[in-house]
Image: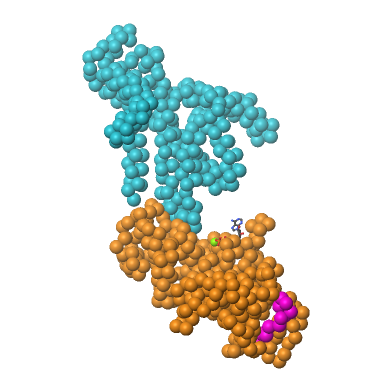
Chain colours: A orange, B cyan
Amino acid sequence: MLEVRNVSRTYGEAHALRDVSVTIQDGQFFSLLGPSGCGKTTLLRIIAGFEDPSQGQVFHKEKRIDNVPANRRRFNMVFQRYALFPHLNVKQNVAFGLQMKKTPSAEVEQRVSEMLSMVQMETYGTRGVTTLSGGQQQRVALARALVNRPEILLLDEPLSALDLKLRQQMQVELLSIQRRLKHTFIFVTHDQEEALTLSDRVAVMNKGRIEQVGTPQEIYEYPKTEFVARFIGSINVLGGEVGDGAADSLSFVGPGKRPFIIKASRDGSRPLPSFAKGTKVSLLVRPEKLKLLKSAPGPEQNTLEGTLKEVLYQGPITQLFVQPKETQGPVWVISQPNTAVTARKQFNLGEKVYVSWLPEDCLLLEKDGNGSGG
Amino acid sequence: MEAVASRPIARLDRRIFLALPALIWFLGFLLIPLFIVVIYSLATRGEYGAVTFNFSLGNYFRIFDSVYLKIFLRSLQLAAVTSISCLLLGFPVAYVMATASPRWRQILMAMVVIPFWTNFVIRAYAIKFLLSDYGLINSLGMFLHLWSEPIYFSNSAFSVWLGMVTNYIPFMILPLYVSLEKFDFTMLEAARDLGASSWNSFWKVLVPLIKTGLITGLIFVFTPALGEFVVPDLLGGAKTMLIGNLITEQFMKTRDWPFGSALSLLLIVAVLVSLTIYLTNRDSRVQH
Ligand SMILES: Nc1ncnc2c1ncn2[C@@H]1O[C@H](COP(=O)(O)OP(=O)(O)OP(=O)(O)O)[C@@H](O)[C@H]1O
Ligand SMILES: [Mg+2]
């Protein structure tokens, strides 16, 4: 178990990390996700030991490690630009860590070739690393780190230099390697899709803070802040304030004084939020929870009236863009699966339409200082 | 110039044309004089310094006289000590320069390069003055009561060493800096990450990757230092003979041009040997 406790890191005036605390269980694929400059690399480098925290501590297996030098920590890192040694060939690169630990040469030989075959590079042993393609260098970098059987493998955006196809292929390989070896992986990325696909747990970071830690599903379905909701996937936002509450529901007064109903999720994993009446809040709904109708539905559904602006057919889904009648704010996005029924084009541009969703399917979150909702 | 068709052969002609001035220079001022030196080295000194072209290897055998070998070894020693001192003192400077902020880089670079703007004889006299019995260093030392009598730095091995190092250290720092500036310092982090000690990170990662700069610097210092005699004369009091003095003497005083030529060729061969070492090393790096 790795535990980061109240870690801050400043560079002069700049705060790269502000009071970050997070616990990572053994054997997890754990992702640090966030926009550029939010402090992901800084946190990873503090865990690796290349950087000291300005405040706070890091514990591994209940032992404090933030004062242990990097070469004494049993962690290994896959660097963003791989950092392979250009004067050594593939085998020598992979063997480097074992040789530093004075491993007997027969064992080095065996473990290196084992690792090279795991990353499917066994035929490249004597090649110079500068002659390899990006994907191949990536595999060597992975092998060079994993051959040391690290207690934690740290990966700093290892796939960001690869093209889409190769990237997806490497994602699958990374995941299967992690499942097989059961090492802890801490994976930095700014690609939310990648984080959701690969991780057991994700920490979403913003401006040096961790905003939320959870499973990919929790992060996507029940974001705790507007930042997380907006950063992961796309989401429609309406600004307003809390209206009257009932036993099992809350009302939200949006633009045009129209009330919307919010309920707890059916499986109980997201309780009804407890906001005082009059609190400034944002109402958020994912595009795939929305339905587009030609006529207003019953009052048990939340409904927004608007004009259809654009229809984008994208193969498995169609995205529809609607300008709500009561706001000048951004258009709403509705994504509809192209099942047998909806595959036919049903709506005309400029048509008056109704966007509706269930009270259980929307979120009510405290308004972000910098959010542009509604 | 005519716009000749871009047939490959025509383009090749043009390229040779462009290289012509350099080729003429090379031929006229290097190869032909060198050839003349070779011819002279095979001649013998006649009466009153005349040259008899009787083509013998006698001059080369004369070099193996222990008197001359001693002089040659002394020069080798001076060049070796200078190169190694420049390396040990210059490496930290180049390292700091390569890792400093852009502003500090400029300041340090200026400090390294500015001495080039002064004639080296003037620099040698400046050192002589600094180290003289009542020069700046002795005055300061006595003023601060570190010592009470002037220390005789002048005309010592120390002042020769100081003069040689200050004279040649920029030639070490600049190529080292060029290599270090291109060096990707995350390599050192990768090495530490893989469990390497500082010692191993240095020898197994840093040194192999800046080898070109190291060897270039060593050759840039060693080659001229081997033939150097002005600095030792000015700062060492012209007490000892070096290969450079010996050669000058053959031409200017003893008027034994053939022997002087043979000695010069020996120096050239010594330099060529070190260059060969350099080039083979560089090639092996490329092959990796
Ligand atoms: N050595 C440093 N000196 C000064 N500021 C730094 C240093 N390293 C990082 N920072 C600052 O700290 C903040 C966080 O940087 P960090 O590299 O951790 O971001 P990141 O989340 O990894 O971003 P990216 O996705 O672009 O890699 C940034 O604002 C950055 O400018
Ligand atoms: Mg980063």
Instruction: Indicate which quadrant contains ligand 1.
Output: bottom right
Q: Position of residue B63 (x, y in %)?
A: 31, 24
Of residue A263 and residue B117, the one placed in the foreground of this image is: A263
Which residue is found at the position 34% from the left and 27% from the top? B17
For the question of whether residue A331 can be seen, the reply is: yes
Which residue is found at the position 45% from the left and 50% from the top? B206
Q: Position of residue B241 (x, y in %)?
A: 42, 23
Q: Quadrant of residue B72?
A: top left
Of residue A55 and residue A102, the one placed in the foreground of this image is: A55
Which residue is found at the position 64% from the left and 84% from the top? A302
Q: Quadrant of residue A41?
A: bottom right
User: Looking at the picture, does residue B93 appear above or below residue A199?
Assistant: above
Q: Quadrant of residue B39?
A: top left
Which residue is found at the position 43% from the left and 73% from the top? A175
Q: Position of residue B60 (x, y in %)?
A: 28, 23
B8 sits to left or right of A72: left
Q: Position of residue B89 (x, y in %)?
A: 51, 40
Of residue A328 and residue A21, the one placed in the foreground of this image is: A328
Which residues make up the magenta segment?
A253-263
User: Looking at the picture, does residue B15 appear above or below residue A214?
Assistant: above
Q: Magenta stretch containing residue A258, yes or no?
A: yes
For the question of whether residue B70 can be seen, the reply is: no
Q: Residue furthest bottom?
A: A247
